[in-house]
Amino acid sequence: MSDSRQREFISFLSAEDVIEKANESLEGKNWKPLAETSNAALISLKTPLVASFFKKFFETKYAFIYRSVEDELISSSSEKLSDLVDTLFQAATERQTLDDSFFVFLDYFKEAPQILEKNVLHYSSLIADKSDSLLTSLRELKNLHERVRRRADQFGLNLALNEIVSRLFSLECPLLPTLESDLVDFLSKFPPDEEGASKFLDNQIVLAVGEYDESSVEVQLSRLETIIKEIKRYSLTFMKWLTVPDNLFVSYLEKGFRRYGTIATWLEGIKEARTEYGLGQSHWEQARRWYFEKISSRILPSFQKAMAGWACWTIIEERQIKDPLAHAGETMRYSARRSEFRIIKCEESSGVFDLCSVDELMITSSGLKKGERSFPFNSIRTQLEELRLSREAFLDSKDAIFVGYTWKYLLPGGGPDKEAKNNERIECFNYYCVTVSATGFGVPLIKLFFAREESARTFIEFLKEARIMSSWKEYPQNGLPAPLKAKTKNRSESEDQINPGEANHKTVEELIIQNMVEESDESEIEETTEVPVVPISAELLEKINSLHYELEWSTKKMNEVEWTYFFPEREKEEEDIKIAEPLQEEMTGFRELEAKIEALSGKTKRTVCKILSCEPEREYSLQELGLTFWSVFVVAPKVTSGGKPLIEVISGDVPRLVWGNNFDEETRELLKARFASDD
């Protein structure tokens, strides 16, 4: 005898047990049963007929009797039915599965909706605690809901199973599980909360992408993009309530960065995912913003903390002193204003991040910006100079370091001029001047005075650290997505691999089909006899449908299929085409430039050949090349490819010329080899 059947036999409540406990609880008075099952009974005192007219003169008493699974006879009595609620709940929930027979007692209690709700929550919590599979636990919870649904509707009770469903969604499940239509309807009625949906998404990502691996970041990011797209499609059919967060890709980057690797490792993985596995534009933009956020969050806080309380001035004018000996030996007088560094940290429409500003100079992720003109980091130069200035040269000395005195009027040898009237001593202070300039720009972008040397050096180091943000470049989208990691097998195949000796092992579904085939074969041989149709009662029909529903689920559970999910591997021909496209574009640019140069003639072509004989990407003055401004001005607009000029002229006090900035190294070498010899 199985344990469950034995427990049912032990917990059977006999008539003798009811009589014994009823006489004991109701003090031997006349009593009558109100409702009884195989293991519980609800009884009350039998009131005389006249009690219907004089209720207040007669006392009513109730008793609830049941036999527990430990074969203990338990009873509780009271003048109010509400006092027996706890005993009823204890009797209804001491078994591992829901017992429908206890529902008959609910008709006598005003607290029936609360009792039923507590009962359902108790058994649904047991399902969540003992299950380790999402699909199995969802099916069991759905069966529980079907068994109590009619009673809940009768009491007007709305069962709140959303919290339990959320707990179930943290359990293991296959990749993009296929749900039956009844489960889809059940989840649409009781969807999980945001935490449960988030755990489900994390589980799907782990199945599709795998654990974090620093050596294959690009493959994981490609898989991540694929599974995000597939989950969105999947939710339209099976989980319409599921909303995939827009920051799911970025949150994966953030978690991976916290666990393993450096920002450089993840940056390289993002680039390779773009160029080798075709990372989409939307996720490419999200990765770019995340990268800039990580860099700026590492650079800006320390810089902001270090610059607190700085004394800094922006030089706005420098005037030469004609008579230095009458002005403490100073040769320049500086006009300046107090400056402050303001942290901005915002993104422009062009995708460039603004980090901070000082006066009119803006420091961005791509370089420096002054007015409408931008200067990349590779053209920025800084120079630090220590200056000892008196008040004759610079008046504002607040926070500056005092270094001594000098005289207003000096002799050529450096001593004080004793013959000068009112020759006073003047204080001298140390200043640290940082000059920021750009290649090809005639005047400095900004000149700053700092009162402390460490402040000046911190500003220079900040500019150097900000250069790393310019390492992000736009890359073409190329390649095919990487195949997902999850490749599951049919459960029956897995069991055959585990038990290879059981060759005749068959599932319940296969046995049912085999029996049906055998019966149909026998029926063809035997003579058919008419069987009278016996009508089935409504209660029996409902019971048959319920058993059929559970049997159908048991059959499916024994042969549960986990779907295989994979992506086709990239074909070699497609790979060759993808690799050949950039090379073809490079050759097209060279051919276009070659055709335009060949179309030139005479002095114009000789000018181009002379320019191409020089080093590319290096700036030359027109005097060094022996060219006139007019000759370069005429030829430069004629040699372009894709709207990009081959030869550029940098304006300024001394015009300079450079070629090849807009083209790759291979194109420059081809052009130089082709035309430099014609000079």
Image (cartoon, rainbow, N blue to C red):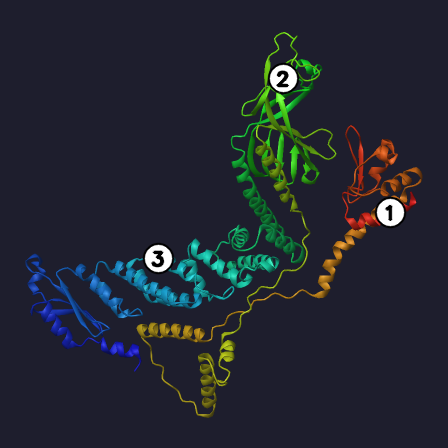
Report the residue that reaches farthest toward the right: 602
Report which quarter residue 107 is drawn in: bottom left
User: What SS does tag 1 mark?
Assistant: helix
* Residue at figure coordinates x 24%, y 78% from the top left: 9
Q: Position of residue 630 (x, y in %)?
A: 86, 31
Tell which circle, 1 or 2, labels the residue nearer the N-terminal end.
2
Q: Name the residue tied to disc 3.
A: 160
The kind of residue tagged 3 is Ala
Quadrant for the N terminus, please.
bottom left
Residue occupying image coordinates x 52% and y 60%:
205
From the top left corner, tell me how far across and down residue 334 is, in percent. 64, 21
Nearest to the observer: residue 627 or residue 25:
627
In front of the other: label 3 or label 2?
2
Give the number of the disc on residue 392.
2
Q: Nearer the viewer, mark 1 or mark 3?
A: 1
- Quarter-of-image position of residue 380: top right
Across and down, in percent, residue 626 comes to 88, 34
Q: Give amino acid for label 1.
A: Ala
Disc 3 residue crowd, few under 14, some 14–19, many 20+, Cα 10 Å: few
- The picture places residue 324, in percent across and down from the top left corner, at 69, 16
Disc ID at residue 595: 1
Residue 417 in the image: above or below residue 120: above
Measured Cα–Cα span from mark 1 to mark 2: 64 Å
